[in-house]
Amino acid sequence: MDQPHSAFDELYASEFATTVRLARFLSGDSGAAEDLAQDAFIRVYRYLDEPVRPVEDLVALLRTTTMNVCRSWHRSRRRRDLRMAHHGVGEQSLSEWERELDASMRRLPYDQRAVVVLRHWLGWSEAEIATALQCRPGTVKSRHARAIESLRKELS
């Protein structure tokens, strides 16, 4: 194993948990934090693979990269929210119950949210959803059941 990759392996082993915490604090989203940390490590790895200039402090490079990844993440969320405001229903036009449902849906894990949306908004069958999500129909049923149970608990 060559020197840059060895240094990267050590960096990953010693700094991953700290980087996830930093991403969680910067993003405010514990669900996205690990993905953001992984993105930061990927960028550092690519930088080391094609060194433009020598890196003296890998931890500092990782911290700066993590902050930039989180900043980009916030920008993309803001752009998405603006697009939704322009093309979707405005928050002010929703009833209190609809806002509560929307917030509850956003808290569901992606796979459960996708099943609920495809099933109840688009009216897809379990087989169609399974094909779209590349899983088994039984998986669609269990995700749907878990999602509906979570929504019932939150909204009751």
Image (cartoon, rainbow, N blue to C red):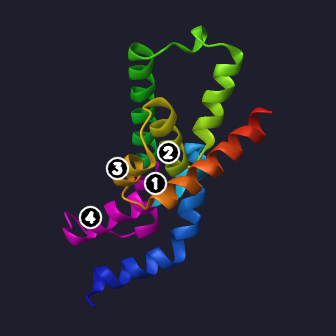
Crowd tier of the residue under label 2, counting other residues whose Cα lies within 10 Å: few below 14, some 14–19, many 20 or above? many
Closer to the camera, 8 or 103?
103
Asked if the stretch drawn in magenta spans residue 10, the answer is no
Q: Which residue is mark 3?
A: 132
Q: Amino acid at mark 4?
A: Tyr
Mark 4 or 2 closer to N-term? 4
Query: Which label number is shown at residue 36?
Result: 1
- Tell me, yes or no, if residue 63 can be seen here: no
Q: Residue at x 45, y 25 (%)?
A: 81
| Most frequent secondary structure within the magenta stretch | helix
Q: Which residue is mark 2?
A: 115
- Tell me the distance, in whole angstroms, between the alpha carbons under discs 4 and 1: 17 Å
- Tell me, yes or no, if residue 51 can be seen here: yes
Q: Residue at x 65, y 22 (%)?
A: 99
Q: Amino acid at mark 2?
A: Val
Percent across and percent down for residue 72 are: 39, 41
23 left or right, relative to 129: right
Mark 4 or 1 closer to N-term? 1
Read off the magenta span. 38-67
Query: Which label number is shown at residue 47?
Result: 4
C-beta proximity under 8 Å, tags 4 and 1: no
* Label 4 secondary element: helix
Figure label count: 4
- Tell me the distance, in whole angstroms, between the alpha carbons under discs 2 and 3: 10 Å
